[in-house]
Amino acid sequence: MDNFTYWAPTKYVFGRDTESRVGQLASEFGGKKVLLVYGGGSVVRSGLLERVKSALDVAGIEYLEMGGIRPNPTDDRVYEGIDIVRSHDVDMLIAVGGGSVIDTAKGIACGAPYEGDFWDFYCGKKIVGNALPVGVVLTIPAAGSEGSGNSVITKSDGLIKLSLRTEHWLRPKFAVMNPELTFTLPAYQTACGIVDMMAHIFERYFTNTADCEVTDRVAEGVLKSIMAEGRKVIDNPTDYQARANIMWAGTLAHNGICGTGRVEDWSSHFIEHELSAVYDVAHGAGLAVTVPAWMRYVAERNVGKVAQFARRVMDVADTADDHAAAMEGINRLREFYRSIGMPLSFEELGIEQPDIPELVAKLHEHKGNPIGNYVKLGPEDTDAIYRLMY
Ligand code: NZQ
Ligand code: ZN
């Protein structure tokens, strides 16, 4: 196990009706004038936005609104939010929604106090050293942004999707998590979330750092729970306990606990981000196609952990040799994705003629060369991985 610092100061407030505590939580973290950020309308239709506003009214907190954030959020809305914050002296962001909304709020939170272009942080020119506090009311368990210090934004000019990682500046101060808010999620979005949270664990599980038995077992346990509870929420979208388990799993998958003490990978995410940037597919659906292709490729070069995953998580018999176990584990993972309605190929993802050379060129231009750690991947490798997605 490597040395590590684990710092995850978000206050999670979990359970039914917890959105009624938003005003009190905003006060606790110093909010006096809030910008409410939300998406394309689900929180308006469900009445959640009105309930959040009422909670702020009761606490005497002023608010402005910025709605209409789209999935795979773009920089233009971040600039717009920064202008609103500066011109109205807003001192806190509250995101009511999922990863796209939260990440937009985080972009605004670090961009508003900075005199330069907020994109400097995303492209690695500057390191975040200040940010307004961010609170979250989570409506979709998926991206894990409610517990991460990260934000993913796409620059419209050139469709460059980049992930900003901070140790603590962009970790939300509080996250309100009411599983009932996820009852309205369409099955497809629920499944995308399940795939994404599993991928957040894979990025940390597939490592060459030895002797992380506790972290491995935590990761394996959460993965197994996600598959069991995931089947339940797909079959019965209003199963509160299953929704609750999936919601908490999404946070644990990405708040760092599954990565403690080891080198992480992240190449599946980098490979997928090019797909969702260019073809605007849902991130989780893109991962359902990307992750098995990546696993098949790396298993040929470094089979150990893939075989361990197959045996411990996918219940492949111990008698199979490592390579056969790994392949069977990957098949079972694909079957699971299929069973929850996820695509397994470019075609099923709705990408008819992917421009693989262009994807590979952009990938390495934006994310470096090589990418990944479990197996280091250069352009020839990533080209081959994209070709396994047909
Ligand atoms: O916009 P509305 O109308 O709210 O609809 C949303 C949206 O269409 C809908 N939805 C959300 N909650 C709902 C609901 N519909 C009905 N009932 C509800 N309760 O779901 C759709 C998807 O929302 P989105 O926020 O895009 O989903 P997700 O949480 O999966 O976020 C995806 C984004 O997060 C990034 C992804 O790349 C992508 O841009 N990621 C962010 C990470 C981070 N910050 O740490 C890590 C992840 O790996 C990921 O890359
Ligand atoms: Zn993800």
Image: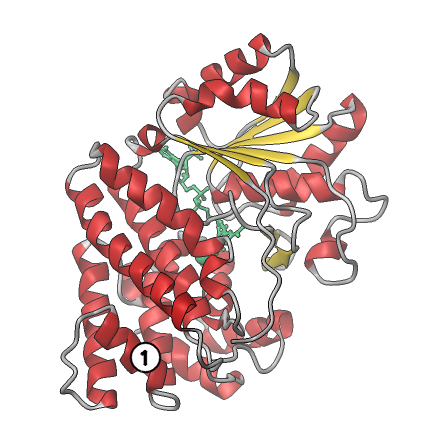
Check the image and report above or below for 157 versus 216. Answer: above
The image shows a total of numbered marks equal to 1
Q: Measured from the top left, where is residue 129 in percent x and y?
A: 78, 50
Q: Measured from the top left, where is residue 115 in percent x and y?
A: 86, 44
Q: Quadrant of the C terminus?
A: bottom left
Q: Residue at x 43, y 25 (%)?
A: 43
Q: Residue at x 50, y 78 (%)?
A: 357
Check the image and report above or below for 288 versus 49. Answer: below
Q: Measured from the top left, where is residue 132 in percent x and y?
A: 72, 36
Give the quadrant of residue 167: bottom right
Kind of residue indicated by mark 1:
Val
Q: Residue at x 38, y 84 (%)?
A: 298
Q: Measured from the top left, where is residue 128 in percent x and y?
A: 75, 52
Check the image and report above or below for 275 versus 75. Answer: below
- Camera-side residue of 307 and 43: 307
Side of 18 where 327 appears, left or right = left
Q: What colour-coding does the image apply?
A: secondary structure
Q: Indicate the quadrant of ligand 2 in the picture.
A: bottom left
Q: Residue at x 30, y 43 (%)?
A: 245
Callout 1: 10 Å neighbours few (<14), some, many (20+)?
many
Mark 1 Cβ and ligand 2 under 8 Å apart = no
Residue 105 visible in the displayed image: yes
Give the quadrant of residue 330: bottom left
- Camera-side residue of 258 and 119: 258
Residue 352 visible in the displayed image: no
Q: Which residue is mark 1?
A: 306
In the structure shown, which secondary structural element does the residue marked by tag 1 occupy? Answer: helix
Side of 275 where 150 appears, left or right = right
Side of 117 where 274 appears, left or right = left
